[in-house]
Image (cartoon, helix red, strand yellow):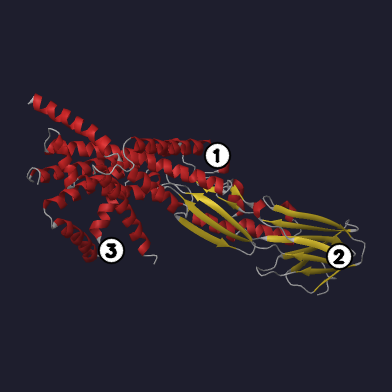
Amino acid sequence: MGAFIPLMIILIIVITSYTFVKQSNSRTKKFIYGQRLRWMLSSYVIVLLLGGVTFFILPVQDFPETSVVSEVEDRVTNEAFIDNFYDSAFEGKIDEVDGVVVSKHLEFPFEEEELFLENVTSDYGGIMMIVEKKEGVASEIIATHYSTGLYIQGEDFTEKLSSTEITLSNHTLTVIPPEQTEIRIADFGREFTIAQFAEKDGSDLSTTASLSVQRMGHDIIYVIVPEQVEVTSTSGNIHFINDETYVD
Amino acid sequence: MYLTETNVLETTKILYKYKLNAYLNALSALMFVQILALFFSFLGVGSMGFGSSTVNLQVTTYSGSMVIVFSLMWAFIISITMTTKPYRNSDFSFVTNRVTSHLSSIAFLITACIFAGVTSMLMGLLLKVIMYFRFGGEIIGSHVGVTDLFIGISGTVFYLILLSSLGYFVGVLSQLHKMMKFILPIVFFGLLFVWGPNAKLPSEIVSFFIHESSLFLFILKVVGTSLLFYMVSILISNRLEVRQ
């Protein structure tokens, strides 16, 4: 069926063009001819001109050039950045990584001696948790959701991403990963008669968008607990920094 | 000699003005075709999907390229129609000959191509404005500047003139003999079939135009080719008898 669509389109154009032109040659039929036709064409041109003027007054910042890939995007879609994101997290220095996004930051008062961690796995996979027992932290659990953000062609879509749900009740810190976020965006391509003669774009959208998404789904829930608290869990994907008292 | 040339020019001018008024419906056909293309363009000219554990990204590309392609088809068909018998005969209401008839038709077609080129590009902008509000500003891609717009209009107009001259040539050829209306499509599709999808000659002809990155050279190529098509059309047509 799909193969017939181009043929149908050509047929429609042929019939339309031929029918309209044939009518202008007919002396008996005066369908959309004369003054009415001039009025119609004038209205058409006015609508198109208004469209053109509106286009040029649209805010350009919402509308970045394809070739403009922001410095932040360039950095966070770099493989070395992703490696550094995880390495720094395991060294307890994730907050020092330049370009990392804090999606959520929660501080729970906690007076208990034992903490149970529950890392829920959704249909789309789980989320990595890193737990640090820190000196000087007393009577509170600090949970922070770090991510690498989503940048495509210079545009920041990080705010569109759903954040993880983190709750604390009855000694249990529960991490529920976000639902998969649906993002629909329009890419304004250049017409082929511009692309042929104008300077070439610096980057290919399909490559950069693909890279952005592949290198974007990086999230870590970083949990800081008081040094004296005993942490237990039966969930997977939980890592500890310098904790020998962890009970799996 | 001088008087004859003046008459040719004046007659062409009168016929051109007549055709601008009489064949205005060609432009309404263009309008219909461009609106049709706009609706098809709402579906996008391309789309990509990417997914990870936390995001599913759908990118749809919108551009006025489909409007331009539809307009190119319009230019080709309109040019063929201009060479048909009713059109040729309507010129004989005036004191004219084949050359002035052709010259005025070509002038009309070039005017229509300029109109079509400008409206095609404006339609592309209108499409983007509609999509801008539909997507609430969630847009990536190229912002067409004024310079780009003029480049686009020039490129489109000359592509239209190229297709129009080809259509005119095909139209004149098909007037040579009644059988030509059947022979030409058979020859065209037959050659496509014989050459196959990887044929060198047709791809080199297309490449001659579409891979030209200099607008100036592209215009030169189109002007040269179109002149050739129009001149051959006039020469062939002169061999036909009056009011055949």
Any mark on residue B198, and which?
A: 3
Residue drawn at x 31%, y 36% is: A34
Q: For mark 2, what is the residue?
A: A169
Residue B189 position, x and y percent, is 23, 62
Q: Is residue B101 above or below residue A134?
A: above
Residue A242, percent from left and from top: 80, 65
Badge 2 density bin: few <14, some 14–19, many ≥20, Cα 10 Å: few
Q: Nearer the viewer, residue B59 or A199?
A: B59
For residue B211, say whether it is visible.
no
As measured in the structure, the alpha-carbon distance from the residue carrying label 1 to the one carrying label 3 is 43 Å
Compare marks 2 and 1 and give the one earlier in the sequence: 1
The amino acid beneath tag 1 is Val
Q: CA distance from mark 2 to mark 1?
A: 47 Å
* Mark 2 vs mark 3: in front: 2
* Residue at mark 1: A60
**Quarter of the picture holding the N terminus of chain B:** top left
Q: Chain of mark 1?
A: A
